[in-house]
Image (tube, helix red, strand yellow):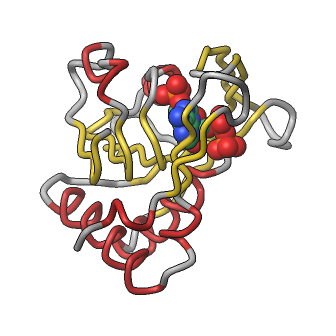
Amino acid sequence: MDFKQYVADVPDFPEEGILFRDITPLMSNGPAFHAAIDEIVAFAREKEVDVVVGPEARGFIVGCPVAYELDKGFVPARKKGKLPREIESIDYGLEYGHSTLQIHKDAIKPGDKVLIVDDLLATGGTIEACVSLVKQLGGDVVGAAFIIELDEFAARDKIADTEIFSLMHY
Ligand SMILES: O=P(O)(O)OC[C@H]1O[C@H](OP(=O)(O)OP(=O)(O)O)[C@H](O)[C@@H]1O
Ligand SMILES: Nc1ncnc2[nH]cnc12
């Protein structure tokens, strides 16, 4: 399937100089979204996965159906102040700004094999933050999967120990 036909390129969003790769057309097309999730699930099935972690917000949209299909649990890595119980927290930078991600301390058990899923890999700040959170809780990151990877940032070099799957490259 030509997945790129379902990505809208939006110049200067959310700020000047950023070319935003909008995957909402992909998400709103049933067969295309299903096929995209299936590709990530195929990558995940090559690994032993105990749990899927996805960062807020677009990581929820992609990560949840992957976890459902694998019959595994989904753990949200949320932006600051959203999780009600004891958390692990990390600050990080991304293509347009900086943020904080938090995860419940009891959501990952030591030794858990974790797949991280997000919509897009740009500078790698978000995925690095997720990897750190999982490791802080004693989890083992067995892979990371994305709908889109922006090659110009060479983010996979930052997490060279993590096997990465990306459905599309720009
Ligand atoms: O590789 P990076 O430079 O870290 O950029 C990628 C991240 O940026 C976007 O999330 P954003 O923080 O904009 O949040 P959203 O999902 O709530 O839109 C995207 O969904 C990734 O999580
Ligand atoms: N260029 C981009 N397009 C869409 N989402 C992003 N997240 C970070 N950079 C992005």
In front of the other: 166 or 55 = 166
Viewer can see residue 133: no
Position of 5 relative to 43 (above/below)? below
**Apparent side of residue 8 relative to residue 160 in the rendered image (left or right):** right
The x, y position of residue 96, in whole percent, is 66, 22
Position of 139 relative to 91 (above/below)? below
Viewer can see residue 160: yes
Q: Quadrant of residue 113?
A: top left
Name the quarter where the C terminus is drawn.
top left
In front of the other: 147 or 46 = 147
The x, y position of residue 138, in whole percent, is 42, 27
Q: Residue at x 32, y 65 (%)?
A: 3
Name the quarter where the N terminus is drawn.
bottom left
**Apparent side of residue 166 relative to residue 65 in the rendered image (left or right):** left
The x, y position of residue 32, in whole percent, is 38, 78
Numbered disc total: 0
In front of the other: 98 or 19 = 19
In front of the other: 155 or 7 = 7
Q: Quadrant of ligand 2?
A: top right
Q: Residue at x 34, y 68 (%)?
A: 36
